[in-house]
Amino acid sequence: MSQPSLSLVDTDPAELAVDAIVIGLHSQPDEGGALLPAAGAESIAAAFDGKLTSTLALLGASGAPGEVTKLATLGTISAPLVVAVGLGDEPSGSAPNLETLRRGTGAAVRSLAGSATVALALPLPDDEDAPSVLRAILEGALLGSYKFAGYKTKPQPNRRDPVSALQVHVPDASDAAAAAEVTRAETVSRAVRLTRDWVNTPPNMLRPPQFADAVVAAAKGTGLEVEVLDFDELKAGGYGGIVAVGQGSEAPPRLVKLTYTPEGVESPKRVALVGKGITFDTGGISIKPSAGMWEMKSDMAGAAAVGATMLAVAALKPRVAVSAYLAMAENMPSGTAYRPGDVITMFNGKRAEVYNTDAEGRMVLADAIARACADGTDYVFETSTLTGGQVISLGKRISGLMGSDDAVERVRRAGDEVGEPAWPMPLPDEVRKGMESDIADISQTNTSLDRAGHMLQGGVFLREFVAEGVEWAHIDIAGPSYHTGEPSGYWTKGGTGVPIRTLLSVIDQLG
Ligand code: BES
Ligand code: MN
Ligand code: ZN
C-alpha cells in the first residue's frame, strides 16, 4: 500500500480541518501525577479551557510512553478527534527522546487507520535539534502507517485503511530545512516499506529469480548500475558457497550487485553493503524442525534491507561510493542439495568443510564479501539473519554486531541514534580454534563448541573472507528484522526494515 502524503503546516492546530489531531502528553509523577500537554498542543489545551489533561486523565491517560488516548472534541476545535500520545516525563534538555517520539508517533498514526487526514502537533524544539526531532516524527508516522497489502480475494467489511494524508505542524512551513526532512523521510520510508513488503511476501512468490527481478525492477530509472549473476555465471565465476546452497532448489540462486557512484567527488570513500538473501531456509539436508519454519521466509531480510538502502542512496546522493551485493538462494533438501561433509571452494579460494547445511547464510555471504573485497572497498557492512544465537543472546530488538573497531563503532553509534540498537560482541580466538578442519582451510561451524556462542561462530567464519585492511562489520538481525506479535510503536507485523536507517546514517557520516 502506498505511503501517506506528507505536508507541513504552520497554521493554528486548533483550526486545522482534519479528521484527527495528534498531540503529546507528558507524565509528571513528581508533581502529584498531573499531566502536562507537550509543546505544540498549547492552542488545543487553551480551547479546552484548562480541562484537556484532566479529561484525558479521566479516560485513563497517564502519559506513559506509547500510550494512545482518544478524545472527541465536541466542537472545541476544528478536528473532531484529539489523540494524545504518551511521551513519558518531560525531557530536562530541550529535545525530546527521539525514539520515544518515533514510537509514539507511529503508535498514534497506526491507531488512526480508517481516518483520511491526520495532523500532528508534536513537540519541536526551536533550536539546532529541530531537524532531527522532525525527522523522528516523520519517520515514526510514515513507518507506523505501513500495512502489507496481502492476498485476500474478498473485500474485508471492517477493513480500515492506513491514514492517507498527514499534515505536520511546524513553526514555519516554508522553512527549507524542514522541507528537506520531508523529502528525506519519504525516501527512507519508501525503502523501509519496500523491504517490509519483500520480507512479508510468501516464499513461493519470492524465490531467488523473482527476488532478483524485483530488485532490478525497483532499481530501474534510479541511475544505479545493475549486475545480475545467474546460476551458470555463479558456477563459472567460482562462487562455490552460493552455488552449494542454491543447487538444492529448482529455483536457481542469484547474486545481484547494485552500484552508486557519486558525481563530482574525487576518490570518494568506498562502501560495500552485503546482504543474506535466503528466500526460504528449510535447513537443507540438516533440515529444521517444522514448528515455526514458515518464519524462514524472512531469511532474505538482510538482502532486502541492503537492496532498498541502495534505492534510498540513489535518491539521497551521498558523497560516498556505495555498492551492494545481494546473495540470493533457496536452502532446500533434495537430491541435488549440498551435504554435511562437503568441501566447498569459496570465491576467494578458501575452502570450507560443511558440517551443517542449515548454516547456509555464512556460505553465501563468504562469496559475496570476498567479491566485494575483490572489487575494492574501504568498508564492508554486512547484514544477515544469521543465527538463532542472536535471538537467544540479545532478543528481538537489539542486533548482534561484530567486526573491526572503527566499523563496529560507526554502526553502534548510528544504530543508537536511529532507534535500531546493535550491541558489540567479541570474536574470540578460542572460537576460531575449534573451527580448524582436518581436510579444509576452515570448518563451517565450531565442532567442539556445538551451539555454544553460536552467533560468534558466524562472525568468526565471515571474518575469513574479508580482505586485509578492509574495515568490516557484521550485523546479525535474526531477531530485529522480523516482528512477531502485535504491532508496537512504528513496528508493524512482520518485516521491520532493520537496519536500513542505520546503514543510511553510517553512509551519511562517511560522506
Ligand atoms: N536463518 C537461520 C537463523 C535464524 C534463526 C534467523 C531464527 C531468524 C530466526 C540460519 O540460517 C540458521 O539456521 N542458523 C543456524 C546455525 C547453526 C546451524 C550453526 C541456527 O541458528 O541454528
Ligand atoms: Mn539456516
Ligand atoms: Zn538461514
Image: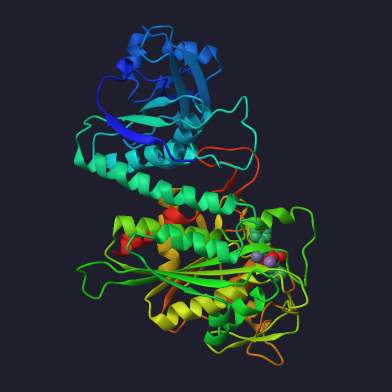
Q: Image point 46% across, 17% down: which residue?
A: 34
Residue 473 rendering spot, x and y as whole percentages? 48, 69
Residue 46 rendering spot, x and y as whole percentages? 33, 11
Q: How is the image coloured?
A: rainbow
Q: Image point 77% across, 63% down: which residue?
A: 288
Residues 154 and 73: in front is 154
Q: Quadrant of the C terminus?
A: bottom left
Residue 40 rendering spot, x and y as whole percentages? 32, 25
- In the figure, 302 relative to 497: above or below? below
Q: Image point 43% across, 36% down: which residue?
A: 141
- In the figure, 271 relative to 142: above or below? below
Residue 420 showing in the rendered view: no
Residue 462 rendering spot, x and y as whole percentages? 56, 76
Residue 236 showing in the rendered view: yes
Side of 262 where 444 appears, left or right: right
Residues 311 and 32: in front is 311
Task: Give ligand 3's quarter of the image.
Answer: bottom right
Q: Quadrant of residue 5?
A: top left
